Amino acid sequence: MKKIICVIALTVIFSGMTFAKEVTPPQWNEFCPSTYLNAQPTKYNKEENYWYQRRVEFNEMINQSKQYQDQKLEDYYTHIRDTEISKNRLWQSGESSFNTKQKKNLQKTNDMNTMFHIRQF
């Protein structure tokens, strides 16, 4: 009789347990170019500042995730990933225009330097 009670008790205990699915948090290196993984604020490099600020915001979101559990945590991690992917798409589209602006500015500088040299002679 004791064995039957023990078996029933163990069955009830283990049937009530749910095994939580392991939810892995997003990692910064999933979204950031390797060049800027450890970016620091600087006065001279706009892109490094951009990636530094993004990392700070990312870490704040990860810290906020500590208030969630189970499905809400998984949903929040999905939200973080979607947000970072969107930011990367915007950055990539802006990067091409950023490079175009730099090339135009470089061309203007070269044109001005050429004009300056012509005027001197």
Image (tube, helix red, strand yellow):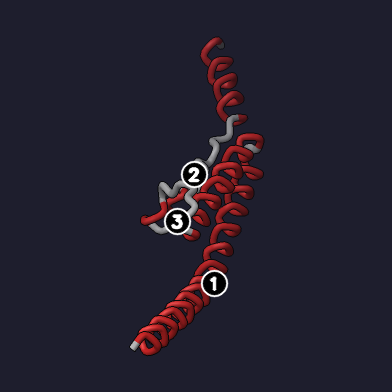
User: x, y percentage for residue 120?
Assistant: 36, 85
Q: Of the residues shown, which amino acid type is indicated by label 3?
A: Cys
Q: Is residue 103 left or right of residue 72?
A: left
Determine which residue is flagged by label 3: 32
User: x, y percentage for residue 30?
Assistant: 44, 55
Viewer-closest of 20 and 109: 109
Q: Of the residues shown, which amino acid type is indicated by label 1?
A: Gly
Q: How far separated are the C-alphas under marks 3 and 1?
A: 15 Å
Task: Compare marks 3 and 1 and give the one earlier in the sequence.
Answer: 3
Determine which residue is flagged by label 2: 24
Residue situated furthest top in the rendering:
2
User: Is the residue 105 above or below the residue 90 in the image?
Assistant: below
Quarter of the rendering containing residue 56:
top right
Neighbour tally class for label 1: few under 14, some 14-19, many 20 plus, Cα within 10 Å: few
Residue drawn 54% across the image and 35% down it: 19
Task: Compare marks 3 and 2 and give the one earlier in the sequence.
Answer: 2
Q: How far separated are the C-alphas under marks 2 and 1?
A: 30 Å
User: x, y percentage for residue 105?
Assistant: 48, 77
Residue situated furthest front in the rendering:
121
Secondary structure category for the residue under label 2: loop
Viewer-closest of 59 and 66: 59
User: x, y percentage for residue 13?
Assistant: 59, 23
Neighbour tally class for label 3: few under 14, some 14-19, many 20 plus, Cα within 10 Å: some
Q: How far separated are the C-alphas under marks 3 and 2?
A: 18 Å
Give the label on residue 94, or none: 1
Residue drawn 54% across the image and 72% down it: 94
Q: Of the residues shown, which amino acid type is indicated by label 2?
A: Thr
Residue drawn 47% across the image and 50% down it: 42
User: Is the residue 55 above or below the residue 47 in the image?
Assistant: above
Quarter of the image containing the C terminus? bottom left
Give the label on residue 11, or none: none
